[in-house]
Amino acid sequence: MTARSGLVERRFQTVGEMSDHVASDICEAIHSAVAARGGALICVSGGRFSKHYFDALRGMSLPWHQVTVVLADERWVDTSDSMSNENLIRNSLLNGEAAAATFVGLKESAADAADSLGAIERRLDSLPLPFDLVLLGMGDDGHTASLFPSAGADELGSALHPSSGERAALLNPTVSPVPRISLTLPTLLNTRRIILHVPGASKLQTYRRAMEDGPVEAMPVRAILRQTTVPVDILLCENEDP
């Protein structure tokens, strides 16, 4: 398969090789950003594969006190919950020397996520965008971040709209037991580069479907794959073993 303009496909034999590549890319992006602008702004996703490169990255010598790490999306659960992406980031990445990084999460204390959108927007508005690097995964249904095809049409449409003006969106996908907060498409695209990691045979098949014709709403990852503003590295690995 030939990737569209602006997309670069990179294939790996193992998830371990792919996670090492991601960690090295993040390391390079941080060093370059700190040298050029005095700080680095990185957006990361949760998920099983992310933990692999968090573990690799945590052991690298980096100017962590000059790094800000932002979540791409979050489940509306307590940050101590095992389902929480913030919990994953804090336990897998932001400890040891990496604890010196600034972390920007998407969870507030309010029980109702809708009551917290204003505070989350203000927090995101204070970021010195663009991101230096955005790291995204992809689900078997073609979602990325928490932009799910099973979310309500109005919710998803607003989150995907290129000129929505919102930094974050509240979504209630039918496949999720809890509400989700996601950075909107224009926020995710406000970056110098994107890495989309696709580990495993099942997700590789999903990626191939996403590259075919069809509505973005049916597979929201298409919004990342079809845009031509930001370069995207697609990391592919059929084998899920580390």
Image (cartoon, rainbow, N blue to C red):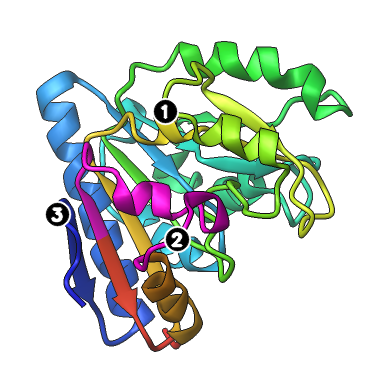
Q: Is residue 208 left or right of residue 206?
A: left
Mark 3 nearby-residue class (10 Å; few <14, some 14–19, many ≥20): few
Image coordinates for residue 212, horizontal then vertical, percent: 36, 68
Query: In the image, what residue type sits under mark 2?
Result: Gly
Specify whether residue 226 is painted magenta: yes
Confirm or deny contact between disc 1 and disc 2 (CB under 8 A).
Answer: no
Mark 2 vs mark 3, foreground winner is 2
Disc 3: which residue: 5
The residue sitting at the right extreme is: 111
Q: Earlier in the sequence, mark 1 or mark 2?
A: 1
The region drawn magenta spans: 211-233
Which quarter of the picture shows residue 174? bottom right
Disc 1: which residue: 162
Q: CA distance from mark 1 to mark 3?
A: 20 Å
Quadrant of the image for the C terminus? bottom left
Disc 1 is placed on an element classified as loop
Mark 1 nearby-residue class (10 Å; few <14, some 14–19, many ≥20): some
Image coordinates for residue 192, horizontal then vertical, percent: 22, 35
Mark 1 vs mark 2, foreground winner is 2
**From this viewpoint, is residue 105 visible?**
no
Quadrant of the image for the N terminus? bottom left
Which quarter of the picture shows residue 154? top right
Q: Nearer the viewer, residue 86 or 170?
A: 170
Q: Earlier in the sequence, mark 2 or mark 3?
A: 3
